[in-house]
Image (cartoon, rainbow, N blue to C red):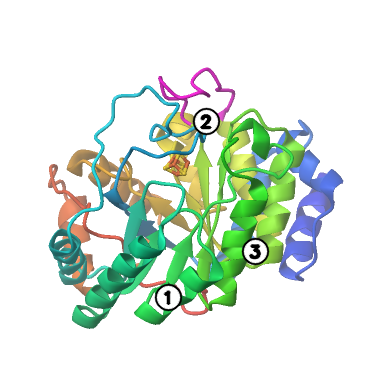
Amino acid sequence: MKRTFYSELVSTSLDGELISDACCEKILSSPEIELLPLLDSAYQIRKTYFQNTVQLHILNNAQNGNCPEDCHYCVQAKTATTDIDSYPLKPQSEVLAEAERAYQSGAYRYCIVMSGRGPSPKRVTQLADLIQAVKTKYPIEVCLSVGLIDEPAARTLKEAGLDRLNHNLNTSESHYPKICTTHTYQDRMDTLHAAQSAGLACCSGVIVGMGEENRDLIRVAKELRKLEVASIPVNFFLPIDGTQLEDTSSLTPDYCLRVLCLFRFINPSAEIRVAAGREHHLRGMEVMSLYPANSMFLEGYLNATGKESSRTLQMITDAGFVIETNGDISEHLQQTQIGQEGVLLKELEVLRPRMGSKT
Ligand code: SF4
């Protein structure tokens, strides 16, 4: 009986059909559905599209803090009292130097992340100049996370050479007012549609554990499927002192893994990334996340330490997965894996996406 449930999940997903909401609920919370066969089923789908490869990503913030929005989960929100390092947009020379380091390290994609509601027309022009400068100097993909944008802005950025826009949906439409009041879910959808109309690939994901119900996660997973996003970061919420959601935390490793499986069954060919919170919430079961997911942030995200990066790389290879790199970076990764603690991989956004994956 259970075997039928698991094999039907695999065939439904691989046949391109949508899994029912009742089935999704079972995946997330039925004690009859065991974790190991569920992970095995998700892995069969992941293997079809990505074999046993793992893509690694590292974020670089070009602007941090002082945001006028009130996203309840974010330390950069105007309502947060967390002590953080705030700085305005880095000068072009600094961003170019980072892009050069990324390129010389063999990175496939350089990702520029900025705090704020969204860029002014003047800031869009500055960013377009910046992107054009990076693209002119280095044959590297550029991804930008910049808040809300409209179609003209998206076109300007696309014409400047931008390859991909990151803009997370974060949660379902009905739960959205509980995590932010200064912009809406529809604002976020509009940004994704604007980016797609301008020809930009989209990366959009979720934050799990912000007081939502199973049905919210199911809805957003299905919304991302409709949007056909290339890449889905799945973050596990870390309650941080000073944010409005500082007391929210109810995740278990078992539940986090079930969420990753759910996203794989619903979005079989998308790059699914285990993002923030994996170390804290998955704990000793962290490596199991690679059975449904094919992509990972190195820990720290903005301030990765060499020791932790080495641990992550070791974990991936110990489990028999292959880190997807371009040639230049493999030696660096090898050196890191053999114990060079203190190696900082911050400049690497990594890596050549799999053939057939959307970028
Ligand atoms: S818009 Fe971005 S930077 Fe600003 S509070 Fe929300 S998540 Fe944080």
Determine whether, in the image, residue 174 is placed left or right of residue 140: right
Per the rendered image, the range of residues in magenta is: 238-252
Circle number at residue 72? 2
Q: Which image quarter has ligand 1?
A: top left
Q: Secondary structure at mark 2?
A: loop
For label 1, the residue is 156
* Predominant SS along the magenta part: loop
Q: Could you tell me if residue 359 is visible in this image?
A: no
Q: Could you tell me if residue 224 is visible in this image?
A: yes
Q: Secondary structure at mark 1?
A: helix
Considering only order in the chain, which callout, 1 or 2, is on the residue closer to the N terminus? Answer: 2
Determine whether, in the image, residue 75 is placed left or right of residue 9: left
Determine whether, in the image, residue 211 is placed left or right of residue 294: right
Q: Residue at x 59, y 75 (%)?
A: 197
Q: CA distance from mark 3 to mark 1?
A: 32 Å
Q: Nearer the viewer, residue 310 or 211?
A: 211
Q: CA distance from mark 2 to mark 1?
A: 31 Å
Are circles 2 and 3 on residues that touch, CB within 8 Å? no
How far from the left and from the top, in percent, is residue 188?
59, 53
Considering only order in the chain, which callout, 3 or 2, is on the residue closer to the N terminus? Answer: 2
Q: Amino acid at mark 3?
A: Pro
Q: Amino acid at mark 2?
A: His
